[in-house]
Structures are given as structure tokens and as C-alpha cells.
Image (spheres, rainbow, N blue to C red):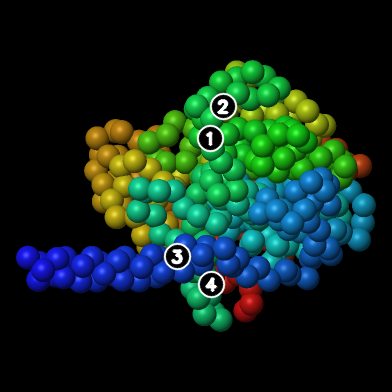
Amino acid sequence: MKIEVKNEKTSAIIICIIAALCIFSLSKQFKSMLVEEPIYPGKGVSEIKMLSDYFEDIKGTPGDTEVYVLKGEKPGGSILVLGGTHPNEPSGFVSAILLIENAVPEQGTMFVVPRTNNSGFTHDDPQEGSPMRFTIDTPSGERWFRFGSRATNPIHQWPDPDIYVHKSSGQKLSGSETRNINRTYPGRADGSFTEKVSYAITEMIKQENIDITVDLHEASPEYPTINAIVAHEKAMPLASQALINMQIEGINISLEPSPTNLRGLTHRELGDHTDTLALLMETANPSQGRLRGKTDSDLVVNGKDKFYVRAAEHGRLYVPFDEKGHPLSERVARHITGVKEFYTVFGEQNPDKNIDIKGIPNYEDMINHGLGEYLQPR
């Protein structure tokens, strides 16, 4: 009997040691998500500000993040590009970085926020089997980027309520949406952590008198609003002409009006509560869909999935999907081309607020050469 007790104690000690080693190893992996991927500002970057410059309450918090200012020598209009609103939608984040590292304004000003929900980059969605990182090959070697979560990290905002009530409209949503920054605009100075971040972005738009705001997103291939521009009614004339120009270039894209009964989104609330022309873009991202197979960095970057090919054959998707998939280079090229068309058309419609930016690669070059050619250092 004594021998059995001794064996049980020994087994318990061994199990505890193994568990401790596993916890230690996994904690190091989880903590690695706190390390920010490098961004190499190009010669067009004139200043790097912080979001807390517009709302001091978020200073020093995980919600504070860089605002890259690219200002031309000639005065003109202004455009804000929001990447990383949902860090599991990587084309928006990579598009923002590509602009930071390549764009050189000659007239007007471009503001770029690559990590709009900075907290969302510090974790990934549980039970999704998502990769923590993905890499892009460049002439100087691999560049790595985090693949984060759609929502604010719960260690930064907890607990979720049973029901999230959007303050200014009274709209009721699932409690987890309280950490989705694209349901919390225009934000609140005395609100939750996520609401304070969205409030800071709203304040930036007001204080800088930003003319155009473009929020870059992705959607799963089975989602109806995909390969699309979503525009506030004030931005419809701008979006309509930009859409025609993109279609002339051979880019298949649609235009959706911002719904008035779905609140908290950039294209609705920023258009309602500021003077900016609010727009949002969606591309097709198989790595966030429900029908996907193995979720790894290859799926994120190359966008190929045999299960989506089969779903397309059965007419279950809202975008074409074949063996070529929808690679990250294509998705970024769509976003970058959209941004270029928005500020170009805006200048045509408002000659006194022209925006002229050089150095941004065109759609065909990004498709043919890949993203690595346009990511610093090179």
C-alpha cells in the first residue's frame, strides 16, 4: 500500500513538471505576439505621431499606436488609410505598410495607421487554428508579420457584457462585439478601452480636417459583401467614379451603400460624425472563411484552398475561386489601387484640394512581381 502511494506521488510530480514545462513553452509563444514586426518608413514619411496625440487618455496603453504622416511640399487635400482594423485580415495591414514604405506625396497629405486596433495584434482567435505569423519573401530576405485577432485582446478589456449596446444609437449586439473596434465608432471619451481607441481616431479626423478616410478590410469568400467598396452617402459620388476607373482597369468590384441600421462602423459613424468622406474596402480572404482547410501561413499568403474550389463549383461563393486562389499580392493590389483612385478622383472633383502621390506601384506590377519587391529594406 505504501508503495502505491509513493508511485502516485511520483506520477503526480512528473505530471506537474511536464505541465509546468508546457505552460512555460506556450507562454513564450503567446508573449511573442507582443513583439511588433518592423516597419521601415520610406522617404515620403515626414513625421510619425501617436494616436494618443489626439486623445491623451490612451497614452501608454496597448491601444496607442503609430500614425505615419506623409506630407507633400504643396498644400492640398488629405486622406487617411486605416489598416489593421481587424488583424486577422492581413491585406489591409500589409497595404498600409506598403504605402508607408513607398508613397512620396508631392501635393496633399496622407495619414496611415497600420495597426488601427493595436491590441488585436497581440493575440489570435481561440479555437481557429490560426497561424501566429506569416512571411513574405523580399530581395533582402523574409519579412514577418503577425496574424492577429478580429477583436481587442481580452486581457486589455474584460469581461464582455452579455449584450453590447452601441452608445450613440442604442443598437444591441452580441457582447463580444464590444471588443470589435469596427462596431464602436464614433467612440466615447469615457467608454471602454476599445471605444476610447475609436474615439481617438474620430478626434484625429476632426483635428486634422481629413477629407477622405479609407478603412481596409477582408471577408471570407462566402460572405456577400466582398470585393466591394462600401460608401457613406456623402462619399457616393467619389466612390462611384473610382469604381468605374477600377473596372476600366479590369478589376471586378462592386459598390454598396453604407446601411443606416447597422451602427458603429467606420463608413457609417465617421461619415455621420465628421466631415470626412468615409469609405471601406473588402477583398476575398480564404484564411478567415468557414469552409477553409488547413489554416497556415501558406493559405494566408498564397490564398489557395481546394475546399473553396469545390464550394465555387457548387455555386456557394460570392467570388470566383479556382486553383489560382486569391493571393495576398492580389488583395493588396486591389486595396492600393482603390486608395489611389479615391484620392485621384477627389482631386478631380475638388481641384483646390488635389492630392498627388508618387512611388505607389500599380496593380499589374504588384500582381506580376509580388509584394516582396515593394517592401523595405531592399
257 up-or-down from 310: above or below: above
**Which amino acid lies under the numbered mark 2 shown in the image of this protein?**
Tyr
Location of the C terminus by quadrant is bottom right
Q: CA distance from mark 2 to mark 1?
A: 8 Å
List the residue tagged with mark 4. 143
Q: CA distance from mark 3 to mark 2?
A: 30 Å
Mark 4 or mark 1: whose residue is earlier in sequence: 4
Q: CA distance from mark 3 to mark 1?
A: 23 Å
Q: Residues within 10 Å of mark 4 (few under 14, many from 20)?
A: some
Residue drawn 63% across the image and 25% down it? 166
User: In the shown orientation, is residue 156 left or right of residue 237?
Assistant: left
Residue drawn 79% across the image and 46% down it? 57
Of tags 4 and 2, the one toward the viewer is 2
List the residue tagged with mark 2. 164
Q: Position of residue 98 (x, y in %)?
A: 64, 62
Mark 4 or mark 3: whose residue is earlier in sequence: 3
Considering the numbered disc 2 on the image, is that residue within a helix, a strand or a loop? strand
User: In the shown orientation, is residue 36 left or right of residue 74?
Assistant: left
**Which amino acid lies under the numbered mark 3 shown in the image of this protein?**
Ser
**Which amino acid lies under the numbered mark 4 shown in the image of this protein?**
Arg
Q: Position of residue 187 (x, y in %)?
A: 72, 34
Of tags 4 and 3, the one toward the viewer is 3
Residue 177 location, quadrant: top right
Q: CA distance from mark 4 to mark 2?
A: 38 Å
Observer-nearest of 93 and 52: 52
Observer-nearest of 309 and 35: 35
Q: Residues within 10 Å of mark 1 (few under 14, many from 20)?
A: some
Mark 4 or mark 2: whose residue is earlier in sequence: 4
Considering the numbered disc 3 on the image, is that residue within a helix, a strand or a loop? helix
Count of numbered labels shown in the rendering = 4
